[in-house]
Amino acid sequence: MACENPRRGIYLAYTVQGLILLAAASSILAGEYFLALSATVAFLLTMTPSLVMKNLRFCLPWEINFLIAVSLYIHVMGHVGEYYVTLAPYYDKLAHLVASVTVGLIAFFLALFAEHRGEIRLTGPAIAVFILTSTLAAGAAWEIYEFIVDQVFGTNLQFGNADTMWDLVVDLAGAVIVATFAAIALARDEEDRFARFFGEPPTGAEPPEIMGDPAQSR
């Protein structure tokens, strides 16, 4: 399936990817090889959506691919440019907000994809819950990762319990933003606007509805 994304969107994502590579190169020149490795890993992660979706009949909108790249670039520059320290705590919270919105949008499109494939049928409330839980789970996993790194390597990724909790609050805010967007789109019956990102709908029996009207099952 060919992904129909505008060239400007693709070029924007490429530009951010190039900036991440530039950050990796500058870290190597500065002798910061660990930061260079982190930036390289971030660059590879920006390519993951294309690699994963290549053999699936599913395409993420260019906006989400762009947000993935931006989220990783913000994180990379937080360390390479030391913005996590010089602009604390605001830069860190910006990074969490952008990342949580990105994760929430990915969860939204995965839910729509599963329903489009006929694997499951989700109602609006179920999709909203899926977005909230997925985003908060990703945020919690990130905080656990930071805690483990601090304990093992003696770094200072976390600045105490209050910082961690505010990070999770910002993650929740990002999830609520996306869940609200999804609820509005679904309430307006705008699912068809997203159909162009999926392949041909499968044929088969109607899947069971999750969180449907109880009266319909009587």
Image (tube, rainbow, N blue to C red):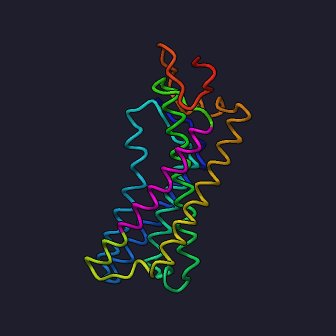
Residue at far right of view: 188
Q: Is residue 15 left or right of residue 55?
A: right
- Residue 187 colored magenta? no
In the rendered view, tell whether residue 148 sits above or below residue 141: below
In the rendered view, tell whether residue 214 sits above or below residue 93: above
Which quadrant holds the C terminus? top right
Q: Is residue 52 left or right of residue 107?
A: left
In the rendered view, tell whether residue 142 sits above or below residue 154: above
In the rendered view, tell whether residue 134 sits above or below residue 110: below
Q: Report the magenta residues as a range.
A: 125-145
Residue at position x 39%, y 55% from top? 45
> What percent of the width, then of the height, locates residue 209?
54, 25
> What percent of the width, then of the height, locates residue 54?
40, 37
Residue at position x 38%, y 41% from top? 52
Label the magenta part by its dominant secondary structure.
Answer: helix
Q: How many marks?
A: 0
Residue at position x 56%, y 66% from top? 169
Residue at far left of view: 152
> What percent of the width, then of the height, locates residue 46?
43, 55
Q: Is residue 23 left or right of residue 189?
A: left
Rendering quarter of residue 40: bottom left
- Residue 129 colored magenta? yes
Q: Which residue occupies the foreground of this view, 180 or 16?
A: 180
Q: Which residue occupies the foreground of this view, 46 or 118?
A: 118
Residue at position x 37%, y 66% from top? 144
